[in-house]
Image: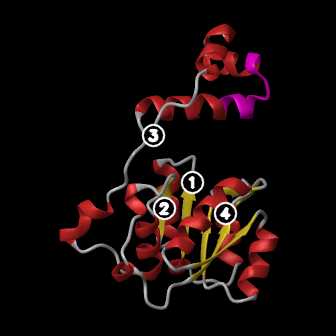
Amino acid sequence: MPKHDRHSPMDSWAGAPDIVIADDQAAAGDELARRLRGVGCGARVATTFEAAGCAIRQGASHVVTELRVNGVPAADFLKDCGVPLDRCAVVTAYPSVATAVRFTRMGLAGYFAKPACVRTVVDALTGRGCPPEEVSACAVTWPSLDRTIWEYLNQVWVMAGSLSAAARCLGIDRRSLRRMLAKYPPRL
């Protein structure tokens, strides 16, 4: 378990929320759900907003979503989902200042870049936040620069559809990109 998600029984949240995670990348949603369950929250993964809506009707009280799920903007879903916006958060692999400002102005509980600290997400959803003396305990352990670069190159490759197209998008030689991607992922 990552260092920033360790907790003792005293850290559990009383009346932990039941959270639906809307993310079209099932592996990412499952990982976040596993970490949320590890701190005592109820967590379900929905790979479409329709499935997330069903989970909300079945009792999910909080929503964590990616910016877009199957091409549908999260802002459109969140406005009509029936869950108060102060119980919703965005956890995204593609953060930007513009979208952070937009979602903050909408009144969301939080906007986080992946990988997000589970404690920080749950604190934002429940309105607790960290006391000033515990801010360092809630700090996210960031991946190394080499790992971030490797993940970025992989994302471009997946989005471009081929190694040659990815190399053109990045403005580098195809063979260089292939060598960079052939290595094992650097340590976090």
Q: What stretch is highlighted in magenta?
A: 156-164
Q: What element carries label 4?
A: helix
Q: Residue at x 70, y 79 (%)?
A: 81
Number of the label disc, if any, that sits on residue 111: 2
Label 3 to label 4: alpha-carbon separation: 29 Å
Q: How far apart are marks 2 and 3 (CA)?
A: 22 Å
Q: Which color scheme is applied?
A: secondary structure
* Vertical position of residue 147 compared to residue 142: above or below: above
Quadrant position of the C terminus in the picture = top left
Q: Residue 188 carries which label?
A: 3
Disc 1 designates what residue?
92
Inter-mark Cα distance, 1 to 4: 11 Å
Q: Which mark is residue 74?
A: 4
Residue shown at the point (66%, 63%) measured from the top left: 74
Q: Which one is closest to the eye, mark 2 or mark 3?
A: 3
* Residue 44 figure quarter: bottom right
Q: In this view, does 88 lie above or below 58?
A: above
Give the residue type at disc 1.
Answer: Thr
Contact between marks 1 and 2 (CB within 8 A): the answer is: yes
Q: Would you call the spot at circle 4 few (<14 residues within 10 Å), some (14-19), or many (20 or more)?
A: some
In the rendered structure, which amino acid carries the disc numbered 2? Answer: Tyr
The first of marks 2 and 3 along the sequence is: 2
Check residue 39 for magenta coloring.
no
Number of numbered discs overlaid on the protein picture:
4
Q: Which residue is drawn at 52% across and 72% down?
A: 38
Query: The disc labelled 4 sits on which kind of residue?
Result: Ala
Magenta: main secondary structure equals: helix
| 179 relative to 147, above or below | above
Q: In this view, does 93 lie to the left or right of 142?
A: right
Between disc 1 and disc 2, whose residue precedes?
Answer: 1
| Rendered residue at 24%/60% (across/down) | 136
